[in-house]
Image (spheres, rainbow, N blue to C red):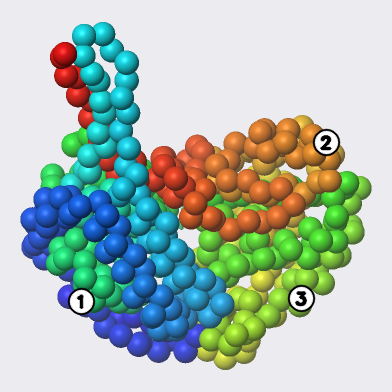
């Protein structure tokens, strides 16, 4: 069986990719299992060197990978270059881990107690379509560094960069079976990662709905699982902030990647006394957003990834009270304009649900307590921003918002050297940051009697 890969700008087919069957998935897992002892036993310094060699080969192919992502997912070329560079940077960062996978020596009477961090075995990584390259790298770089082998399933509609990265791994000298890309259906390949006993951990990024099924499936084997799921993050703007700067930057915090971003600040809460000033600044910045061919260097927003995603987002727009929109090009392509809705009630679908497209809902608030309570009035808790010039308030609100990744007076992107993950139904566990390799190990305790 094959899947047609569509360019979301031209709507034309650009590739046809084979979907792995259950037997092919099992064969890939078996090869990863066979490759595991050899990879685990590579000397730490040598494993580090191999990961740096992999990073170097990615670096030589940044432009090729970026162009592939523009064609497959409609990402702007600027973003796509950053994304390919992020894979390289993750590999370089975690290439320092093999020689630093420290255990501890713990004082005990009658002997010596030491701990070891041992790799799990085969790790299965399931990737969504919105950030095919970074999300793959956030899983495989620390997993490989800790001595695991990896099978990786890209999303059905965006497999091209992952397949290429798998080829580049071999070109860089990683042994066969250490990193295997298995394109195919979630219900076949992804599901098999959950049920196959040789896969010892599943890293899933995707919708909360599928994440719950993955978690339930992993429970059967008490399989380790990391979940990175949906979001409905708030951008909270206080009247004491630089309101003009907050309005100028807000579109980039939600319309980046055409809003198909789990960290999108898709709810904006504005203190009532600054509301009109903010909304008028927002209108200017939204209208100025360059929604053009994503292959052009100055493009700031491309199309939706697919016709299905465009239609799903359009349904939210149709049901909402639209205040204003930005532009969108004429012609083919799964385009939507950046869209701003003024929400009157927290029960509106556009306020509550993860739209996963270029739609933002704005609402006024009257007090710090109300802002925190509105921000937390969601099942999600992934990201968010706080704009204020009052340091005490910045810290109080940052501590008050139930969310894994917050930024003050900025909309910081995910950094590979700081932890990333969600509160509540936005996920389970953390990726990235200095501790990520440990999440791909078991801690073993050994007591040696004197
Ligand atoms: P999705 O859940 O439909 O699919 C994600 C991946 O899971 C795909 O590779 C898919 O093939 C696979 N899959 C589907 N059903 C499966 C099953 N039964 N068993 C195993 N695998 C299965 O999500 P999507 O539409 O591709 O991505 C959008 C969602 O991802 C959004 O909700 C978004 O918020 C979320 N997301 C979260 C993060 C994060 O880090 N928290 C990052 C990016 C995207």
Residue 287's label in the rendered image is 3
Q: Residues within 10 Å of mark 3 (few under 14, many from 20)?
A: some
Name the mark on residue 367. Answer: 2
Which residue appears at 57% of the width and 91% of the height?
331
Query: Where does residue 436 sit, x and y in percent of width and height?
Result: 39, 45
Residue located at (50% from left, 85% from top): 9
The relative height of residue 80 versus residue 149 in the rendered view (above or below) is: below
User: Helix, strand, or loop for circle 2?
Assistant: loop
Sequence order check, earlier mark of 3 and 2: 3
Pick the front one: 34 or 68: 34
User: How many residues crowd around disc 2 within 10 Å: few (fewer than 14), some, or many (20 or more)?
Assistant: few
Cα separation between marks 3 and 2: 30 Å
Q: Position of residue 215 (x, y in %)?
A: 31, 41
Tell me if residue 220 comes above or below residue 69 in the rendering.
Answer: above
Q: Residue at x 27, y 55 (%)?
A: 45
Which secondary structure, mark 1? strand
Q: How many marks?
A: 3
Residue hosting label 1: 18
Kind of element beneath mark 3: helix
Whether 448 is drawn above or below 192: the answer is above
Above or below 242: residue 55: below
Where residue 403 appears, as percent x and y from the top left, is: 58, 40
Q: Which mark is residue 354?
A: none
Indicate which disc, 1 or 2, sits on the residue closer to the N terminus: 1
Residues under labels 1 and 3: Cα distance? 41 Å
């Amino acid at each position: 069986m094959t899947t047609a890969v569509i360019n979301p700008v031209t709507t034309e087919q650009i590739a046809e990719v084979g979907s792995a069957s259950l037997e092919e998935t099992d064969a890939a897992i078996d090869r990863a299992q066979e490759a595991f002892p050899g990879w685990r036993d590579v000397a730490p310094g040598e494993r580090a060197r191999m990961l740096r060699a992999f990073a170097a080969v990615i670096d030589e192919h940044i432009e090729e990978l970026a162009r592939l992502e523009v064609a497959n997912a409609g990402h702007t070329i600027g973003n796509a270059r950053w994304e390919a560079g992020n894979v390289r940077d993750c590999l370089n960062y975690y290439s320092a881990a093999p020689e630093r996978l420290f255990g501890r020596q713990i004082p005990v009477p009658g002997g010596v107690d030491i701990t070891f961090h041992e790799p799990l075995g085969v790790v299965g990584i399931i990737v969504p379509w919105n950030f095919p390259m970074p999300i793959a790298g956030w899983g495989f770089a620390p997993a490989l560094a800790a001595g695991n082998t990896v099978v990786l399933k890209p999303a059905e509609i965006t497999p091209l960069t992952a397949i290429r990265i798998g080829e580049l791994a071999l070109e860089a000298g990683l042994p066969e079976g250490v990193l295997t890309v298995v394109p195919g259906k979630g219900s076949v390949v992804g599901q098999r990662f959950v049920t196959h006993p040789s896969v010892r951990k599943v890293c899933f990024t995707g919708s909360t709905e599928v994440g719950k099924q993955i978690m339930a499936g992993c429970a059967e084997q008490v399989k380790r699982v990391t979940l990175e799921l949906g979001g409905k993050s708030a951008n909270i703007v206080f009247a004491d902030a630089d309101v003009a700067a907050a309005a100028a930057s807000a579109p980039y915090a939600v319309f980046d990647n055409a809003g198909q971003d789990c960290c999108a600040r898709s709810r904006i809460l504005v203190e009532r006394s600054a509301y009109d000033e903010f909304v008028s600044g927002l209108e200017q910045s939204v209208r100025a957003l360059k929604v053009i061919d994503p292959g052009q260097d100055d493009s700031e927003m491309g199309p939706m990834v697919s016709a299905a995603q465009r239609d799903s987002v359009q349904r939210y727009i149709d049901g909402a009270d639209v205040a204003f929109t930005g532009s969108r090009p004429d012609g083919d392509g799964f385009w939507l304009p950046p869209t701003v809705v003024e929400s009157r009630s927290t029960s509106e679908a556009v306020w509550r649900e993860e739209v996963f497209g270029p739609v933002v809902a704005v609402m006024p608030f009257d007090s710090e307590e109300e802002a925190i309570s509105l921000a937390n009035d969601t099942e999600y808790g992934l990201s968010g921003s706080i704009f204020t010039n009052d340091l005490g308030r910045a810290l109080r609100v940052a501590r008050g918002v139930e969310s894994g990744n917050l930024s003050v007076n900025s909309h910081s992107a995910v950094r590979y050297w700081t932890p990333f993950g969600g509160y509540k139904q936005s996920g389970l566990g953390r990726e990235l940051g200095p501790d990520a390799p440990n999440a791909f190990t078991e801690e073993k305790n050994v007591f040696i009697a004197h």
